[in-house]
Amino acid sequence: MDAFEVTKKTTDLLNQKGWNSHDLYYYKTEFLIQSNNKKQIADIVMFKGGIPLGVIEVKSGIVQLKNSIEQVKGYAKALGVNFIFISNGNEIFQVFNDSEVLHKLFEFPSVDEIRKILNYL
């Protein structure tokens, strides 16, 4: 799969979990991040009411997934978010700010699951 196909598959998975189903929780693709006079483009950024919640980096292969950990963590830091994901369209991994380990997920979190997590914070 090329990057466009991976992004399309990833956004389809997000739509199935309730993202972009209403105005409060949604995502944007190819989101421009400006930090330290540097422009970067995150593949997918998840929002709640205009405030970034998470970032998703899409890659076409497993090697690229592991190699993109620092890249996506940089996006997360610039956006001030803690939900960090990497996907190749078939596999979904979560990365935590304090770790270099990819944690495999069965699916992206739904809007309801994110809402519950945010209520506990």
Image: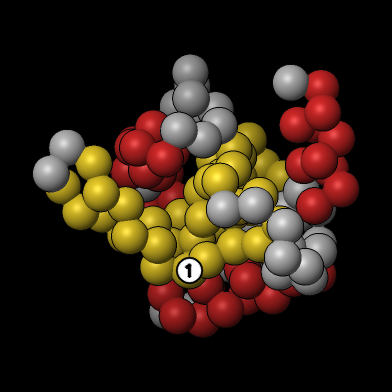
Q: Secondary structure at mark 1?
A: strand
Amino acid at dot 1: Thr
> Residue 83 at x, y = what percent?
59, 38
Quadrant of the rendering where the C terminus is positioned: top right
Q: Nearer the viewer, residue 55 or 8?
A: 55
| Residue name at image x 52 percent, y 73 percent | 6
> Residue 50 at x, y = what percent?
57, 53
Q: Nearer the viewer, residue 11 or 24?
A: 24
Tell whether 101 sits left or right of 111. left
Q: In the displayed structure, would residue 15 be above or below residue 85?
A: below
Render colour scheme: secondary structure
Tell whether 48 sits left or right of 116. left
> Residue 11 at x, y = what percent?
63, 71
Q: Which image quadrant is residue 89 in?
A: bottom right
Q: Which residue is mark 1?
A: 29
| Residue name at image x 81 percent, y 41 percent | 115
Q: Nearer the viewer, residue 90 or 115?
A: 115
Does residue 1 appear in the picture of this structure?
yes
Does residue 62 appear in the picture of this structure?
no
| Residue name at image x 51 percent, y 81 percent | 5
Q: In the displayed structure, would residue 75 be above or below residue 82?
A: below
> Residue 76 at x, y = what percent?
43, 38
Outermost residue toward the left in this view: 37
| Residue name at image x 81 percent, y 53 percent | 110
Q: In the displayed structure, would residue 114 be above or below residue 19?
A: above
**10 Å crowding of disc 1: few (<14), some (14-19), many (20+):** some
